Image: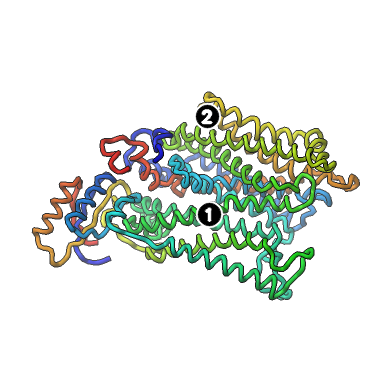
Amino acid sequence: MNNKNQILGVFDDPDVVTDAVKVLVKHDVKIKDVFSPFPLEHVWELLKLKTRIPYATFIYGVLGTSSVFAFLYWTSVTDYPLTFGGKPHLSLSFVIIMFVLTILFGVVLTLATLLIREKMWPGKNNPLPDHRSMDDKFVIVIEQGRDMDEKEIQKINELLKQNGAVEVNRSNV
Amino acid sequence: MYNIKARGVLIEGNKSYHDITRDITNPLLAKRTPSWWWITAFFASAMLAWGIWGFYNTISVGIGTWGLNNSVSWGWAIINFVWWIGIGHAGTAFSIFLLVLHQKWRTSINRAAEAMTIFAVMAAGMFPLIHMGRIWNGFFIFPYPNTRGPLWDNFNSPLFWDVVAISTYLTASFLFWYVGMMPDFATIRERTTSKIKKSIYNVLSFGWVGSARGWLRFESAALLMGGLTAPLVISVHSIVATDFAAGVVPGWHSTIFPPFFVVGAIFSGFAMVLTLMIIVRKVYKYEEYVTKKHLDAITRILTFVSLIMGVAYISEIFVAWYSDSPYEMFVFFKNRAVGEYAYAYWAMITFNALMPQLFWFKKIRQNITIVFIISIFINVGMWYERFVIVVTSLSKTWLPSTWHGYSPTATEIAIYIGTIGFFILGILLFLRFLPMMAISELKGINKETSIVTKNSENHE
């Protein structure tokens, strides 16, 4: 990712790590990321992280409904109108295909959005700061800026330790 | 808000997070494939091989190899198709409905249920395909610019809706299932020591790292995908039901069909989940993850759904009598209840409406062997339900001169057995190579539902 040095606070409890994030945020320590084996909803709130994926999905849905209707209208009314049992060409039963394909549009494009936004692809080599965060550890990553002096780093280390970090490590991943 | 401890401890044995990772990944990282796996895979492959013979026979000779005739133009193919689609409803019902209802006990079961959905829907898809006879013209069902006008599909036909609904259901379920597995693939990637496995699981994990922002987007996207897929559970089987209900055949032409089919599908799907999970927990010794309370919760749902099934059967009979139509009355009172297929009708009533009522007794719910046997009977009963609907109605319709019996030929039986073999083989591969429980979700519920500490209450 980058060659900057990072401070890793390693925790082994989801609630302790959430409390630690709260304390760090209060002390104006800039947290780069928190790696965890499962989602920690309170951490998102504390780090003020937001996602706009729901809005994107809504747009995909609208796109799906309207384009499917346009296609059905074009094929059954404009391009080659065929009369089945005297029924109207523009039929209410279009709604079923529109409904189902709206869902298909929504699902496929939402997934695509997730992969694009997260920059994920099969076989991407994405090194973890601490590989135990996939198992049972929760890792707070703090970027060590160039302007940070030893005292500041010491303060961050102290804060992490005091708030329940089982280990404080350095990493340059 | 609601009592999250209502179902008691969900993961027994006070597991740590590392214990969960180890317990779920060990079977798939093991070097040796257990012998029971090879034996089952051998039998499943044999079944599949016979099914391939049935396929070959149908394609090379034609639909004439089946026992169909002018009156009974739908036979085992549609029965098995509806049966498999029904089983394929459990995965999404489990994952989404229980997610929306905050039922955390779904976590140790949903992954396997979703896998079941995928393979069951694939098995179901084979029947319409093979029923076309000229399978090489199968692409005719899709709307594409062609040299015949272009002549488009009839977009008002339930059979075309079926094509759309089932391919959408398969795609959406597969994507939802896969997305849920990405974090678990990453866990396996970090845990395995084998270089080959590491690179394979890295490809599968799409480079997932589990950062806070990543989890936020993941959760948001997964919830949206799940929420969008949920209505498909209702729509797919409603559309399958309109294949029947849109026809005027006595016994089919009924507005109760769509909800009746959806309920039946959830019924058979949950029964299949029960069958599968009882085997899995026994074989993999996952009694601490799929506890007796999990099985108890499923049996309670089955009891309730079985009551709905019973009411549906009764209301069908009532409406047949109330309609005062001699044809409807003939179907229910002569053809189904006492006719030559009466055994199927009474099997359906017994296995679906009566037998699950035994689950009212706690002693029976607690006895895993009896629960297992009843779950199998429900699956058989649901097969008979489709048999009753298709065959009894078609074999004796309006004109007695067109009455014709129906019995399947070896080719039809072979195709059915073949799809069962395919399903079992698919489940076996899933159990061997993919994480069979959602590791990250299990960890997510572990602390709040299963471990009690001083700190637990602070974050509710």
Q: Quadrant of residue A104?
A: bottom right
Q: Amino acid at mark 1?
A: Thr
| Identity of the residue furthest to the top in this view | B363
Q: How is the image coloured?
A: rainbow
- Subunit bearing disc 2: B
Relative image position of residue B171 (x, y in whole percent): 55, 58
Q: Quick one: label 1, few (<14), some, or many (20+) residues within 10 Å? A: many
Relative image position of residue B207 (x, y in whole percent): 37, 60
User: What element does badge 2 sit on?
Assistant: helix
Relative image position of residue A56 (x, y in whole percent): 45, 65
Residue assigned mark 2:
B368
Q: Is residue B417 visible?
A: no
Residue B360 shows which numbered tag?
none
**Mark nearer the N terminus (2 vs 1):** 1
User: What element does badge 1 sit on?
Assistant: helix
Up-down relation of residue B310 to residue B139 (above or below): above
Give the camera-side residue of B427 and A121: A121
